[in-house]
Amino acid sequence: MATRVLVLLGTKKGAFILESDAARQNWSLKGPFCETWPINHVIADPETGTIYGAGGNEWFGPAVWKSTDFGETWTHSSEGLAYQAGEEAIKSTWSLAAGNGRLYAGVQPAGLFASDDDGESWTQVQGLRAHPTAPKWQPGGAGLILHSIVIHPEDPNQVWVGISAAGVFHTADGGKTWAPRNTGTRCDYLPEAERYPEFGQCVHCIVMAPSQPNRLYQQNHCGMYRSDDGGQHWESIEQGLPSSFGFPAVAHPRDPSTLFLMPLNGDIAGRYMPDAKAAVWRTRDGGSEWQAMRQGLPQRNAFFGVLRQAMAADQLEPAGVYAGTNTGTLFASADEGETWSDIAHHLPPILSVETLVVGA
Amino acid sequence: MPEVTVQLPPALLRLFPGSEPEPTVPASSVAEIIDALDQRWPGMRDRLCDSTPRIRRHMNVFVDGERATLATPVTTTSDVFIMTAISGG
């Protein structure tokens, strides 16, 4: 079977899918799907090839969309995707993760749901919102959202989530109990003596290194971090980057020491490419040194940003890397970030980018 | 139970293949209309109401020209429209 490479986009106006062969030079675009709802995150379950889209529509509320034929047809469900009567209703579905036979969805206001029937119905993971810190969680700029879900590849009881702006939380018992995992990450927006609280950090994105489940990377509102103990301690790795502020982080599919970032110029500086020149920053050594990759990216008037879920890598060798902008352009590299080209533009603002390789 | 005819908005019909623009359902209140619609097209309640529960903020139900709530009574002669409000961006 010929290899198909799919790049899955969530945008402000529906989901889109780009497709190419393994060379990743020529791309076709399909969409918009999901009735042009705002779709915050589109993922594929690599085990089944099923594509899921998380979104929320101003008229019709939150739902998870699903396609079992690579985007040709879609259904939607929000059965069980609700808090108790009297609680604030869920506004939108924000993030998805599939693993160990389970599908997770993060929602706004922040909470976690799980589906054991491929997205047909959902059950709340009760323990998270029952955490004693939950009444004090404060929303970030996008609201009180649960946006990062990291599943341990071998232990289904372990999950990490990122909540803006409550921080990182971890469960080791399948979601019954949770513990903050924020030691070492700072809050520059708090008075100096209170900058390292137990929770309340504005985490932007967390990802896990391949083959090293205890190694996590975190792009935060205030810095870039690595943990080698499952988030119990975080170490700053922002030295050498143009800014401590950015949204996405992308792990390499095979090398636990390689990470890709797209820092912005700063949280109060406009939140676009530093000096209006676009660059993807790559480390090959876990964050000690950083290299700017610019070839093929615009080096003048680049006043765009890349949002927290809008960057991804594929599984091929060499790895492809993709970054979607909030101005509707998708940049792609088929050589681990060395060179880039613009493979789609004039799309709605891109909210998420993920990949699926079929038949490799 | 009275039979009530309801006008549904095009954007809702697109989400439920096979649904009808003017179904007639047994109901004596707006809540019972939505119960009946959900029974006929499973999942339709979640598109029209949130879990509070109430009619979604950007959905409007009109009964005889007045904005209704879930508790609003209806009769066989009621004019019932479910409409999408001005929204988007």
Image (cartoon, rainbow, N blue to C red):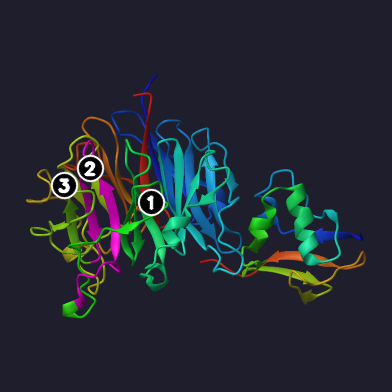
**Residue B10 seen in the current view:** yes
Of the residues tagged 1 and 3, which is closer to the observer? 1
- What's the amino acid at mark 2? Ala
Kindly indicate whether the residues beneath marks 1 and 3 are on one polypeptide chain: yes
In the image as oriented, which residue stretches furthest toward the bottom? A191
Give the alpha-carbon distance from disc 1 to disc 3, as whole Å. 23 Å
Percent x, y of residue A151: 35, 44
Q: In the image, is A21 to the left or to the right of A220?
A: right
Tell me the chain of label 3: A
Q: Which residues are magenta?
A: A194-221
Look at the picture and state if A133 lies above or below A347: below
Tell me the chain of label 2: A
Label 1, on which residue? A352
Kindly indicate whether the residues beneath marks 2 and 1 are on one polypeptide chain: yes
Percent x, y of residue B40: 77, 48
Percent x, y of residue B28: 86, 65
- What's the amino acid at mark 1? Ser
Task: Identify the mark at residue A205; answer none if there is no mark.
Answer: none
Front one among A53 and A228 = A228
Give the alpha-carbon distance from disc 2 to disc 3, as whole Å. 26 Å
Look at the numbered discs 1 and 3 and tell me whether their residues touch, using CB distance below 8 Å: no
Residue drawn at point x = 37 percent, y = 21 percent = A2
> Quarter of the image holding residue A17?
top left
Label 3 environment density (alpha carbons within 10 Å; few <14, some 14–19, many ≥20): some
> Quarter of the image holding residue B69?
bottom right
Q: Is residue A209 magenta?
A: yes
Q: In the image, is B8 to the left or to the right of A14?
A: right
Label 2, on which residue? A209
